[in-house]
Image (cartoon, rainbow, N blue to C red):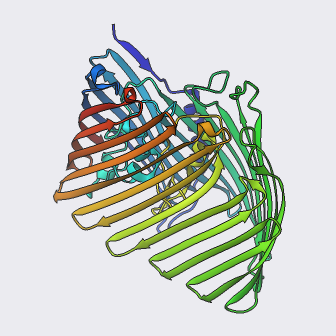
Amino acid sequence: MNKFRCQPLPESIQWTLALWLTVAGWPVVAQESDGRPAGEWQITPRISVGATYSDNIRLAPSNEAEGDLVLQVDPGISVRKQGGRVEARFDYTAQGLLYTQQGEAKLNNNLLGFGTAELYQDHFFLDAYGSISQVPVSSGSRVDAGNLGLGGGSSFATGLFNNLNLGLPGSADIFNPIGLFSNIALTGDQTTATSLGLSPYWRQNFGGWTEALLRYGYSWSGFGQNADSNGQGGASNGDIQSVDLNLKSGRHFSLLNWSFDYSRQQQDLQGQNSAGSDNGGSTQESVTGQANYRLNRQWALLAEAGYENNDLATFQIDNNNGSYWGLGALWSPNRRFDLTGLYGQNLNEVAIQWTPSARTRFELSRRDQSVGLNPGIHWEGSLNYRTQRTQWSARYTEEVTSTQQLLSDNLTGVGPDGQPILLDDQGQIVAVGGPFGLSNQEFLRKLFETDITYQRVRNSFSLRAFSEDRQYQDTALDESAYGVGGLWTWRFAPRTASFLGTGWERDELSEDQQNNYWVSVIGLARVFTPDSGGLISYRYYENDAEPADQGFRENRLNVRFSMKF
């Protein structure tokens, strides 16, 4: 008898739909000049059917490999709204999988949604968002390629494979992310991660003297497999509440500009931590004031002061509460270059911003702060450069965060086309997941990413690399991953295109375990009509691991047909 493992539409999705109805259901009164609504709802049902053959469906060592033919049906729906008082994006796919040889079936829910509504003109707004994805439970386990840093944790596959756009008419919508890198491997170490959020905020301008923003945020993160009573084997469900107040100088200020920021965040998890005690709550609170007095076109005096008050449940070793202040100057010899320096008690900082042209922007800062989370020297930087046919970008960031925080932070804004999408600091879509497993421990995250894209009429090439390091209070848990990948696409006929990609990643998860992943894919896609298309692809996936019994090799052939209505 076949075993059927179905993950039904959970209560969390029902709450997501309720939030969406709250936002989407607000009346839209804005009109265009011809009397038509300023923005129209675009509702696009879709379905994808296909078959995948894998010669190692469980990603087991070679002598234990089992093949299987997986039949896949992926009904889904996309909702778009732009203009008027509502901006919205909602994508849901039910990934149905039938394993013909293993006698198993399962249903994976995949959701990506963001909506913002103007409830009271120019003042009161509401954001609602949610995401559901499949993620690995434990670091170092056998994970499908879709959960590698190359597949989900960095911008590699999100910009290359998971958002495959071959320059064909309608291909961006037809070849949706569920397919080429589907997490279909039966590793027994995959669970569903859900994040839901609601954030009302108020904007107020006080007569041109002060601009104010007051925001409240609530997000909930849940996992299909929770951590056990000792905080192991997954991550606990939890919620994050935040309050942010921002005041800044208005248009009546000319020589003097100032700002005041207050932020407080509370994270509460269910269950117990690795020490067997209650997880309790983690609190982060900060107050910051800044002032800028312009002396002339080239020079300005700067002042900054603040106070940090943080209490983290699992990251106490590098936490120093207290106040800081600094005085300094801003030098702007021209409108393209800024050099900033601050020095004072518990603070010194040097920052450069260089914009030699409209196509180039470079920022780099070194901040040494003796109070706050992980006090000491921190570097932040980014580079964006574009030509007629190429785009170059790179960024480096450091932050103390958690699994739950990263999950809730993914939905942050609106893309270049006006549609709300998952964004990172550079405005690129971010996928939930990565090579690291779930944890209740907070950690210091150091992330570097770079991206080079070359685009012509029929050909495009993308090269991406990343490095991520996670440092925990317990140094035995420290993890790192780094990798590089590239993709070449060629539209050799009006409705037909090919793609060829490869990637490599190394995970260093402990002294005793390292993974070296290789993944290569080649495929052909054809659009039959603007609303339908087919794709065939071959993928090779290998892990040369230490210890050797964690290694595997897999060949995978995928054929599918997709249609939107």
Locate residue 390, reporting x and y percent. 34, 70
Is residue 205 in view? no
Q: Which residue is at 73% across, 58% downward?
A: 202
Q: Which residue is at 32% across, 22% downward?
A: 98
* Extreme-bottom residue of the structure: 296
**Count of marks overlaid on the render:** 0
Is residue 200 in view? yes
| Image quarter of residue 188 | top left
* Extreme-top residue of the structure: 1
Work out whether residue 235 or residue 39 is closer to the camera in this orientation and state it: 235
Locate residue 236, reporting x and y percent. 64, 30
Work out whether residue 192 or residue 413 is closer to the camera in this orientation and state it: 192
Q: Viewed as shown, does residue 1 lie left or right of 237?
A: left
Q: Quadrant of the N terminus?
A: top left
Q: Viewed as shown, does residue 436 lie left or right of 162?
A: right
Q: Is residue 365 above or below residue 355?
A: above
Locate residue 482, reporting x and y percent. 45, 49
Work out whether residue 263 or residue 278 is closer to the camera in this orientation and state it: 278
Q: Quadrant of the C terminus?
A: top left
| Image quarter of residue 275 | top right
* Extreme-front residue of the structure: 511
Q: Which residue is at 58% across, 45% downward?
A: 470
Q: Is residue 362 above or below residue 452?
A: below
Q: Viewed as shown, does residue 70 lie left or right of 135?
A: left
Q: Which residue is at 63% across, 40% downward?
A: 475
Locate residue 60, reporting x and y percent. 34, 25
| Image quarter of residue 183 | top left
